[in-house]
Amino acid sequence: MTGPATRAPGLGRRLACFVYEGVLLFGVVMITGLVYAGITQQRNALVGKTGLQVTLFIVLGLYFVGFWTRVGQTLPMQIWRIRLVTRDGGPVPPARACARYLLSWLWFLPALAAVHFSGLENAAATFAAMAVGVVVYAALTRLHPERQYLHDVACGTRLVDLPPRAPEPAATAQPDA
């Protein structure tokens, strides 16, 4: 079984989708922060920071779990023709999607922990550590025979490549009667 719907998408496409997801989520995070600040009357970014972080974690979880369980794709995944399915190719149930969301933080947590414990908590060190962490985590797919991410292997899910969309037939002009 190595057809287009069973093969993992190329790493370049998955990383492009990852970047596109980040751009889209920037808006989600900004709107959530604005609503949170309005509801809690937050006037300083450091006041209520933990509450905002928890809120963002929940909102992002609802976004991903909702899309993965309903259609198997977030908006960027639809653009890049990538779908999330279970190991046997079926739709992803909510519990598995929640587990995948939690384990997908492996993209970031090792880098953030390294920055925190090194004491180099400035923007440049954080960005560099995150960039290296993302590249290393993505490169780990080369160790798996089906080129899947660690969190997908652990959750019994996988990303599959969807075939290109067929071009729409050109509309023919109907003569007036």
Image: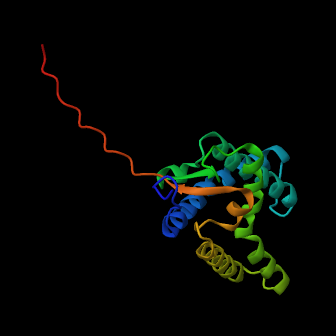
Tell me what residue is drawn at x 77 percent, y 71 percent: 109
Q: Is residue 120 above or below residue 81?
A: below
Q: Is residue 109 above or below residue 103?
A: below
Tell me what residue is drawn at x 58 percent, y 75 percent: 142
Q: Residue 64 location, x and y as percent? A: 68, 50
Q: How is the image coloured?
A: rainbow
Tell me what residue is drawn at x 47 percent, y 52 percent: 162
Apparent side of residue 24 relative to residue 165 in the rendered image (left or right): right
Choose between 81 and 18: the one closer to the eye: 81
Apparent side of residue 49 relative to residue 146 in the rendered image (left or right): right
Choose between 48 and 81: the one closer to the eye: 81
**Quadrant in the rendering for residue 103:** bottom right
Q: How many marks?
A: 0
Q: Residue furthest top?
A: 177
Q: Is residue 84 above or below residue 170?
A: below
Apparent side of residue 86 relative to residue 58 in the rendered image (left or right): left
Q: Residue 1 location, x and y as percent? A: 51, 56
Q: Residue 129 location, x and y as percent? A: 69, 80
**Quadrant in the rendering for residue 112:** bottom right
Q: Quadrant of the C terminus?
A: top left
Apparent side of residue 58 relative to residue 167 in the rendered image (left or right): right
Is residue 166 among the parts visible in the rendering?
yes
Q: Residue 132 location, x and y as percent? A: 64, 80
**Quadrant in the rendering for residue 134:** bottom right
Choose between 100 and 35: the one closer to the eye: 100
Choose between 127 and 71: the one closer to the eye: 71
Is residue 43 among the parts visible in the rendering?
no
